[in-house]
Image: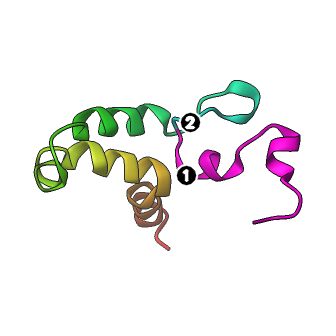
Amino acid sequence: MPFLDLQNKIGIDVDKWMLLQSSKQPFCQAGRCHSFEKDWVECVHGIGAIRAKKECKVEFEDFLECMHRTKTVSELRRHIGA
């Protein structure tokens, strides 16, 4: 337990902000991948982890691509020739 609760004094929750794009963001702007995460959460909600892996695979892949940009970077490298 920290001696100074700096996050509450400042008025932001950095832990939640770093973990969820859909949580309240500083300056009230939506995160870059907010819509992809929202689609994925709506798909997963209430169906269970095993079914979600199969049925929500497309939404999850879109969310991961938005977060990490792995396919975009590999395409750019392929076109540049690096």
Percent position (x, y) of residue 65?
A: 40, 52
Above or below, 22 relative to 57: above
Percent position (x, y) of residue 35?
A: 43, 31
Q: State the mark number for residue 23.
A: 2
Residue receiving disc 1: 19
Circles 2 and 1: CB distance less than 8 Å?
A: yes
Q: Residue at 43% across / 54% down in the picture? A: 72
**Label 1 crowd bin: few (<14), some (14–19), many (20+), radius 10 Å:** few
Residue at the far top in the pictured view: 28
Query: Which amino acid does the dot numbered 1 rest on?
Result: Leu
Q: Residue at 39% across / 37% down in the picture? A: 36
Q: Residue at 65% across / 53% down in the picture? A: 15
Range covered by the magenta-colored residues: 1-21
Q: Nearer the viewer, residue 70 or 63?
A: 63
Percent position (x, y) of residue 64?
A: 39, 53
Above or below, 26 relative to 17: above
Residue 76 relative to residue 27: left or right:
left
Percent position (x, y) of residue 43?
A: 23, 35
Element at badge 1? helix
| Distance Cα–Cα, label 2 vs label 1 | 8 Å
The stretch drawn in magenta includes residue 48: no
